[in-house]
Image (tube, grey):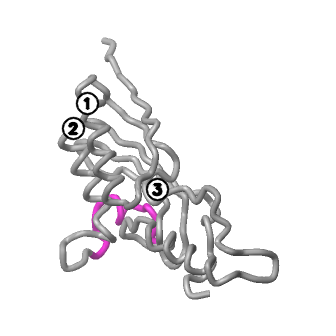
Amino acid sequence: MSQKLTLAVSQSHTLSTVTETLRALSATTRRAASLSASLILFPEAYLGGYPRGASFGATVGGRKDFGREQFKNYFQGAVDLGDTPGAGAGDDWVEKKLPVNKNGVRGDGTREELERVAKETGVFLVTGVVERSGGSLYCSVVYVDPERGCLGKRRKVMPVSEAPVNG
């Protein structure tokens, strides 16, 4: 028995904040669902933003003050999926066994929002994120099933940056 699978690819751009970008992701996913999409793929670094054109004020042997501020803002704008580099996207993260904050979410709530959108629309989400974890930034992709939630993620081997936030 054959099964029809409709795939969608979003050519979306990152907005000013993660909250705004998540709202746009939700609207785009709802549109894809209305067109019978089974899976939607969002761009690399869609949540958290790709630092196109950002130099962070760095040159060999030095970093300028404006660059420190630029990197700090970029770091703070990355998403926190609620795990650590050591724990990674292992079974404890997938099975939601890692600690939650006082609001009942892991990290900044991005994971829970992605799971909510997938569940409400019935569309499997694959989205790129710039992830903040353990003092580093990672370019990752998150896989979110409408029924089971986050199934896992893939971090690039090297973090985007290991530059300290304060220096």
Tell me: residue 78, above or below residue 126: below
Judged by its main secondary structure, the magenta piece is loop
Point 63% across, 60% down: residue: 157
- Give the mark nearest the N terminus, 2 or 1: 1
The image position of residue 48, as x and y in percent, is: 45, 60
Please identify the quadrant where the C terminus is shown.
bottom right
Tell me: residue 131, above or below residue 36: below
The image position of residue 23, as x and y in percent, is: 28, 50
The image position of residue 102, as x and y in percent, is: 19, 79
The image position of residue 113, as x and y in percent, is: 26, 56
Q: Are marks 2 and 1 in contact (CB under 8 Å)?
A: yes
Q: Assess whether residue 63 is covered by the magenta stretch.
A: no
Determine whether the residue tagged by mark 3 lies in a helix, strand or loop.
strand
Residue beneath label 1, please? 33
Foreground pick, 13 / 42: 13
Q: Identify the magenta region.
A: 87-99
**Which amino acid type corresponds to the residue marked 1 in the rendered image?**
Ala
Res. 118 image quadrant: top left
Please identify the quadrant where the N terminus is shown.
top left
Point 60% across, 66% down: residue: 159
Res. 156 image quadrant: bottom right
Tell me: residue 110, above or below residue 2: below
Q: Are marks 3 and 1 in contact (CB under 8 Å)?
A: no
In the shown orientation, is residue 110 left or right of residue 48?
A: left
Point 49% across, 73% down: residue: 73
- Give the spatial CA distance, label 3 vs label 1: 22 Å
Q: Are marks 3 and 2 in contact (CB under 8 Å)?
A: no
Label annotation for residue 121: 2
- Give the spatial CA distance, label 2 vs label 1: 6 Å
Residue beneath label 3, please? 129
- Give the mark nearest the N terminus, 3 or 1: 1
